[in-house]
Amino acid sequence: MVRVAELAQRLRYYRKQRGLSVRELAEQAGVSVSYIYAIESGARGSNAAKLGLIAEALGVSLSDLWGDARPDKGDIPRDPGEGEA
């Protein structure tokens, strides 16, 4: 099972990669802005149905968000620009 922190990191990564604001993603997925913020901050777990809507809006699979498809356990996408000097 994916840790909440990993889910938060993946969601933020894919959202930023697609150039979407939290509001834009929420509108496209049909969920509340506060729900997106709550997941990205790690304040709450996830609802599979809502995560499916979010994944669809991002153009990724649900397993991409969950991290099930990652080839290497340590290979978690980071925020664009993170760690760059």
Image: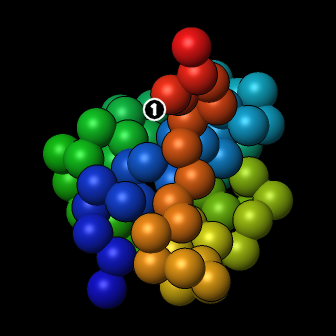
Q: Which residue is mark 1?
A: 33
Q: Residue at the spot x=34%, y=76% of the render?
A: 2
Could you say where residue 49 lies in the image, as x and y percent from the top left?
50, 75
* Left or right: 59 in relation to 25: right
Q: Nearer the viewer, residue 44 or 80?
A: 80
Residue flagged by tag 1: what amino acid is it?
Answer: Val
In the picture, which quadrant includes the C terminus? top right
How many numbered marks, from 0 up? 1
> As displayed, is residue 69 above or below residue 18?
below
* Residue 35 location, quadrant: top left
Could you say where residue 84 lies in the image, as x and y percent from the top left?
58, 22
Q: Nearer the viewer, residue 20 or 81?
A: 81
Q: Nearer the viewer, residue 19 or 57?
A: 19
**Residue 13 shows in this picture:** yes
Could you say where residue 43 lies in the image, as x and y percent from the top left?
18, 45
Q: Secondary structure at mark 1?
A: helix
**Residue 27 shows in this picture:** no
Could you say where residue 38 lies in the image, as x and y percent from the top left?
29, 41
> As displayed, is residue 30 above or below residue 24?
below
In the picture, which quadrant includes the N terminus? bottom left
Q: Residue at the spot x=54%, y=66% of the render?
A: 75
Q: Residue at the spot x=37%, y=70% of the render?
A: 47
Q: Residue at the spot x=45%, y=78% of the render?
A: 73
* Left or right: 1 in relation to 68: left
